[in-house]
Amino acid sequence: MENSRGVRRGRLIGLIAVLVVLSAAAVVVDLPSAEQLRGWVRGYGVAAPLVFFVSCAVGTALFFPKPVLATTAGLLFGVLPGVGLAVAGFTVGALIAFAVARGLGREAVARRLGEGRLRAVETVFARRGIAATLVLRLLPVVPFAVSNYAAGVTAVGSRSFAAGTALGLLPTTVVAATLGDAWRDLGSPRSLAAAAAWLALAVIGVVWGARLLRHASTNRDGENDVRPGTVAGGP
């Protein structure tokens, strides 16, 4: 759990660093505008969104940072088209990781992710199904790529996982795409509002995510304390 919190804090610091660097670059260097970049992208026709969709899917399965792709989506395609492409690609990538994990089996996934983290995620998914997937997407309880592989060895079904993933990714993807869309004007009110929303989601995720994992671990320990052949709460 401590490692997950450290990862989330590291990513938050990384996001702030990226925003600072981009803001400085926009002032010092004569960077192209979003419209100029989109004009260049449109020159490739349908190949551009297709390549980006595949990049999101493959990048998700290979642990590439999702915020970078989501921000790039807003920059290259605008907010609404970018969000659609990114969420579709992320969901497909999550399903790829889900299927790979299910094929590898629990033991192989546990060696990679860690037994403690996997057990907590297993308990959350077993008790809440699609709602657990939605919560894990809305709030970074565990890193996105980690939860994709962990879900593959839990009781959650692939359809519930896909639906919860797509719905849960919308808020953070919209925020990231909005920042990408306004990359030449990161001091604008909408950029500041998007950055504040992203920060709020991260902080809520750290607090609520820690509580959710603690609750899951407590439930797991309680189940393990019940002797075989007895009923919890009985003699």
Image (cartoon, rainbow, N blue to C red):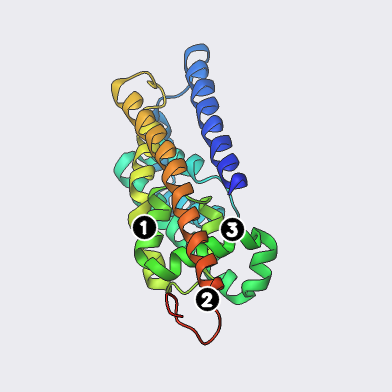
Which residue bears the numbered disc 2?
Answer: 226
Return the disc, 2 or 1, that comes first in the chain's sequence.
Answer: 1
Residue 153 visible in the shown view: no
Considering only vertical position in the picture, is 85 above or below 25? Answer: below
Residue labelled with disc 1: 134
The disc labelled 3 sits on which kind of residue?
Arg
Tag nearer the camera, 2 or 1: 2
Between disc 3 and disc 1, the foreground one is: 3
At a point 45% along the width and 49% down the height, the residue shown is: 211
Compare marks 3 and 1 and give the one earlier in the sequence: 3
Q: Is residue 66 above or below residue 96?
A: above
Q: Residue at x 55, y 30 (%)?
A: 13
Name which quarter of the figure residue 157 lies in.
Answer: bottom left
Q: In which quadrant of the rendered view does residue 35 lie?
A: top left
Does dot 1 land on a helix, a strand or a loop? Answer: helix
Give residue 188's position: percent from left, percent from top. Answer: 32, 20
Q: Position of residue 135 (x, y in %)?
A: 38, 55
Residue lying furthest top: 28
In the rendering, at what x and y percent does residue 82 appear?
36, 45
Amino acid type of the residue that numbered disc 1 sits on in the rendered structure: Leu
According to the picture, the residue beneath numbered tag 3 turns out to be 117
Of residues 194 and 55, the one drawn nearer to the viewer in this rendering: 194
Q: Nearer the viewer, residue 213 or 13?
A: 213
- Crowd rating for badge 2 (residues with CA inside 10 Å; few <14, some 14–19, many 20+): few
| Pick the front one: 198 or 80 | 198
Seen as rendered, the residue at the extreme front is: 235
Q: Is residue 68 visible?
A: yes
